[in-house]
Amino acid sequence: MRIYSHPACLAHDTGSAHAERPERLLAVTNALHTAFPQLDWHEAPRASRGQLLRAHTPGLLEQVLETRPGERMLLDPDTVLSPASAEAALRAAGAVVAAVDAVLGRQTTRAFCAVRPPGHHATADVAMGFCLFNNIAVGALHALTAHGLERVAIVDFDVHHGNGTQAIFEHDRRVLFAGSHQSPLYPGTGSPEETGEGNIVNATLPPGAGSAQFRTAWLQRLLPAVNAFKPQLLMISAGFDAHRLDPLAQLQLDAADFAWITAELVALAQRHCGGRVVSTLEGGYDLTALAESSVAHVEALLA
């Protein structure tokens, strides 16, 4: 198993009061180093312009990469661009591309990308929700285009709906997007009635929902959809903000729930795609919960 990360991801400066802050990534990487000293760490490369343009418009690339702010600036009330953000965004997307190359090139079976900024809210042309580029979408399109895959499944258990990922793929039948999220909650999308071309599967959970409702949603709705799709690669938007300690939402999960869903997804990957899984960090804003949940997730990926 490989872990992809880069020091540049720590330099993306959102401000000390921002929920998506560098300490999140330190909590994850420090916890993984302590729990799994044997892990194979790799430095994330930069995503290329061509790789980014598969998922994003030239206008978004220009905004993120060419603005070059002298200090922090807001792209929207939640999304920050700082002098070091462009490099962080390139490395975060590049990590997922490199992980896809390693997994499909049989250098490893599974990979986790410990990166920030997160990605699943970024649409083809809009950076939003703390996200600059849609890292997992860039990686999935790389798998389809550069490696010739025909079916990639993206699963997302972040507490917020992955609206950007859904929007990028809702008319692309090569990709299944299946996820659970709290509703109502930012960004207000992700109704079960949003089905794309039959390749979008959403499960909503009410505020206060806990382990039983989360697991039921996956067992009855989401995992069967992924199983029926028979993916050649399974990709995970691993957000840990559905944890009961998270300050930005009201679900009541704990680390054991993230271990459970990861184990279920690994078993599904074993069934259909030789166990190949690429996971990337999305949300999670309580540092203790984030560290514990990341360790539980990676431990299940290692199984």
Image (cartoon, rainbow, N blue to C red):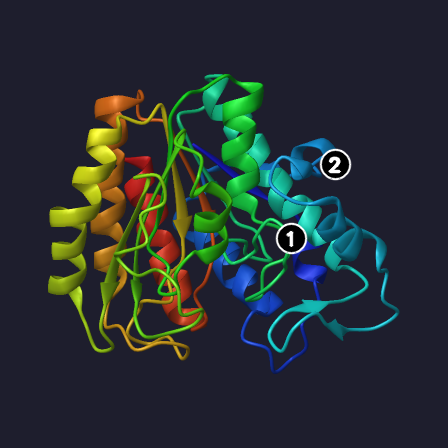
Question: Looking at the image, which is closer to me, 208 or 103?
Answer: 208
Q: Is 179 left or right of 76, judged from the image as shown?
A: left
Secondary structure category for the residue under label 1: loop
Secondary structure category for the residue under label 2: helix
> Do we see residue 107 in this rendering?
no
* Label 2 environment density (alpha carbons within 10 Å; few <14, some 14–19, many ≥20): few
* Label 1 environment density (alpha carbons within 10 Å; few <14, some 14–19, many ≥20): some
> Do we see residue 64 in this rendering?
yes
Q: Which residue is mark 1?
A: 125
Question: Looking at the image, which is closer to me, 281 or 195?
Answer: 195
Q: Position of residue 128 (x, y in %)?
A: 59, 64
- Which marked residue is nearer to the observer: mark 1 or mark 2? 1
Quadrant of the rendered image containing residue 64: bottom right
Q: Is 191 left or right of 37, judged from the image as shown?
A: left
Q: Position of residue 98 (x, y in %)?
A: 58, 31
Q: Position of residue 73 (x, y in %)?
A: 76, 73
Tell me what residue is drawn at x 26 percent, y 30 percent.
229
Of marks 1 and 2, which one's residue comes earlier in the chain? 2
Name which residue type carries label 1: Asp
Name which residue type carries label 2: Arg
Q: Which mark is residue 49?
A: 2
Q: Quadrant of the N terminus?
A: top left
Q: Position of residue 107 (x, y in %)?
A: 49, 19
